Amino acid sequence: MTETPDASAFAHVKNWVFDLDNTLYPHETDLFSQIDVRMTRYVQDLLQLPRDEARRVQKQFYLDYGTTLKGLMECHNIDPDDFLQKVHDIDYSWLKPNPALGEAIKALPGRRFIFTNGDRGHAERAAARLGILDNFDDIFDIVAAGLTPKPQRTTYDLFLEKFSIVASEAAMFEDLARNLVVPKKLGMKTILVVPGNFEPTFSEIWESDPEFTDQVDYVTDDLTHFLKQLTAA
């Protein structure tokens, strides 16, 4: 499924921006499912709901506010630090080191960033487990974004300002097309990272983004191969 990128179309890119979950590690690793379960449990305990109803509420928060956290903050005034600590208390042994990806990222010319709706601790632990953490210049997390998640425009503006990035000199890799709408408008190259063979499981159907695919310049189900093609010359 991986498209062969035209390396010359990326010759101007000086800043490489990567989402974390289901982007830097394969969707089939299913690490995010642990976080998802903990978010449902958090809603269940907070609102004293049956699990199925708590999950419905959680997903509605996600759709309405961009993240479950933002919805809980807006509607129930929760402590964001408590939420982030509890939902990211997961088993990272599910992740396998990926030295090939690390080398492909390291070979990219310019600066490299992780831009995530999770928190820095989660990003650091996941990237360290993958063996790629040292290949990034910095991490921009939900706390740095003032707890306002992608795809809100203000969050991208904060990211670009913090690192003095010219959007037209950047490329962004994401697993959700909706999070590429603003980058595309700003002039970034946009790359959608999809599951292997693009076969989403039932649990992901609710978050599919068919209406946003026009915001995508390239699609790949093999990030490592895609990056290697950019630097092969």
Image (tube, rainbow, N blue to C red):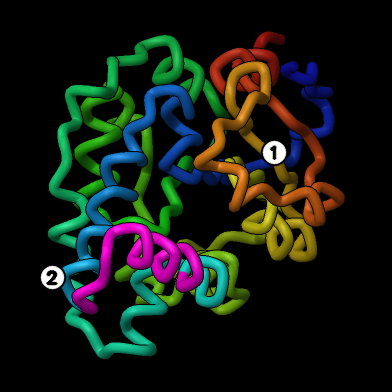
User: Residue 40 sits in which quadrant?
Assistant: bottom left
- The magenta region covers 47-61
The residue at the point 61 percent across, 13 percent down is: 225
Q: Which residue is mark 2?
A: 82
Looking at the rendering, in which quadrant would you find the C terminus? top right
In the depicted structure, whether residue 97 falls above or below residue 166: above
Q: Position of residue 217 (x, y in %)?
A: 81, 40
Q: Is residue 113 above or below residue 23?
A: below
Residue at image mark 1? 191
For residue 88, above or below residue 82: above
Q: CA distance from mark 2 to mark 1?
A: 33 Å
Element marked by disc 1:
strand
Residue 125 vertical position relative to residue 165 in the rendered view, above or below = above
Locate residue 223, reporting x and y percent: 57, 23
- Disc number for residue 47: none
Q: Nearer the viewer, residue 209 or 219?
A: 209
Residue visible at 34% across and 71% down? 69
Under mark 2, the amino acid is Asp
Q: Residues within 10 Å of mark 1 (few under 14, many from 20)?
A: many
Query: Which residue is drawn at the image coordinates 73% and 52% (left, top)?
Result: 188
